[in-house]
């Protein structure tokens, strides 16, 4: 699977992980109006409906990562499509914590990476998929002047793997293990309380490499924009083959040349889709209203039809399934 990027002219006017692509193919930031609407998510309140008003709580992740950025855009886009529908964002530790919050009914929706989503759905208990989010190609990044050029060169190095409860961290450990490195013994793993601290550690020389995911991931943007530039690479070819087995949550992905400043060649790697999961008991009418609003936004990768081939019909919320049926889309 290949990801569109600024290097691909066909992306002009297309849509990316967090919204429509702009002139250079980069996802546009929320409009001022959408951002102001999304800002309502700073005030937490339990779900409530009155005279058409509907309020839901969405669990995201720590500041500085891709989930909070998506959550902001998601909430703003939904509010623009359905002004009486408010999605309030709650900062959390990430995918693992979000699964627990959903199971406990403490949030209505949660952003969960595939490495956590698929096992959680398989365990049962009433969790369902409300919508897809976006595919996340996993990559290591180092300063352009670093001698590190591959996973093998990470042996003995200090590597930021992510936050304690993030699905990206799980993927990073898997990428190292599949490439022949023990993520606990062959490197010095660094886990974070805040995703935004990763680029800082690399800049200050307290870490040699950073693992992350997504073409528009804030940590990647931060290091790629540094004066000296950055270098990106994925798992070894053997590691990719091991991780991209049929039926696995991770798949082979190609990051096109030019996706990052100074990236002259495409990068082979692996990645997974992230999902918006719904808590047990979220009723069909509520889910239907949210997904119907989502279908009217420019969040192209988050539209429900993208669930085809990613999850089976029994994992999808009935409200989402209803939207799909009305659009003539069938999940197996």
Image: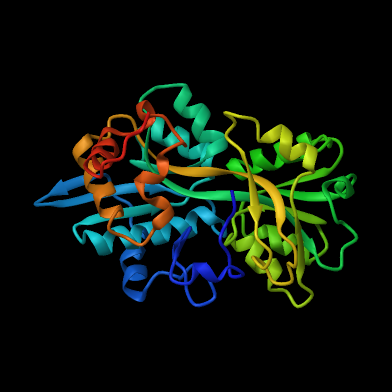
* Residue 224 visible here: yes
Compared with 152, 279 (above or below) is: above
Whole-percent x and y of residue 253?
A: 63, 48
Compared with 129, 125 (above or below) is: above
Q: Which of 115 and 46 is in front in this view?
A: 115
* Left or right position of 73 against 202: left
Q: In which quarter of the image is residue 166?
A: top right
| Quadrant placement of the C terminus | top left
* Residue 104 visible here: no
Whole-percent x and y of residue 57?
A: 33, 47
The color scheme shown is rainbow
Residue at position x 24%, y 50% in the image = 292
Whole-percent x and y of residue 215?
A: 60, 60
Q: How many labels does the image show?
A: 0
Residue at position x 86%, y 48% in the image = 154
Q: Quadrant of residue 178?
A: top right
* Left or right position of 250 against 261: left
Q: Which of 60 and 147 is in front in this view?
A: 147
Residue at position x 75%, y 78% in the image = 227
Compared with 137, 11 (above or below) is: below
* Left or right position of 166 against 268: left
Q: Which residue lies furthest to the left in this view?
A: 51
Residue at position x 54%, y 34% in the image = 116
């Amino acid at each position: 699977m290949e990801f569109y990027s600024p290097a691909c002219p066909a992306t002009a006017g297309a849509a990316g992980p967090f919204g429509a692509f702009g002139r250079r193919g980069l996802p546009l930031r929320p409009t001022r109006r959408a951002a102001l609407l999304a800002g309502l998510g700073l005030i937490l309140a339990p779900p409530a409906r009155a005279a058409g008003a509907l309020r839901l709580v969405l669990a995201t992740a720590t500041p500085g990562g891709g989930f909070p950025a998506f959550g902001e855009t998601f909430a703003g886009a939904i509010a623009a499509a359905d002004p009486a529908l408010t999605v309030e964002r709650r900062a959390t530790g990430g995918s693992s914590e979000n699964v627990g919050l959903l199971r406990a009914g403490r949030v209505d929706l949660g952003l969960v990476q595939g490495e956590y989503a698929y096992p959680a759905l398989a365990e049962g208990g009433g969790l369902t998929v409300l919508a897809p989010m976006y595919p996340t190609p996993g990559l290591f990044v180092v300063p352009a002047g670093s001698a590190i050029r591959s996973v093998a060169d990470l042996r003995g190095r200090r590597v930021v793997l992510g936050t304690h409860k993030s699905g990206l961290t799980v993927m990073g450990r898997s990428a190292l293990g599949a490439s022949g490195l023990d993520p606990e013994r062959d490197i010095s793993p660094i886990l974070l309380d805040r995703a935004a601290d990763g680029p800082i550690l690399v800049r200050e020389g307290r870490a040699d490499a950073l693992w992350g995911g997504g073409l528009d991931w804030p940590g990647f943007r931060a290091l790629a924009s540094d004066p000296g530039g950055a270098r990106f690479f994925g798992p070894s070819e053997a590691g990719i083959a091991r991780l991209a087995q049929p039926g696995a949550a991770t798949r082979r992905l190609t990051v096109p040349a030019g996706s990052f400043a100074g990236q002259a060649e495409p990068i082979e790697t692996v990645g997974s889709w992230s999902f918006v999961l719904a808590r047990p008991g979220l009723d069909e009418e509520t889910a239907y209203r949210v997904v119907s609003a989502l279908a009217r936004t420019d969040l192209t990768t988050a539209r429900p039809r993208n669930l085809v081939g990613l999850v089976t019909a029994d994992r999808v919320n009935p409200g989402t399934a209803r939207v799909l049926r009305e659009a003539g889309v069938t999940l197996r």
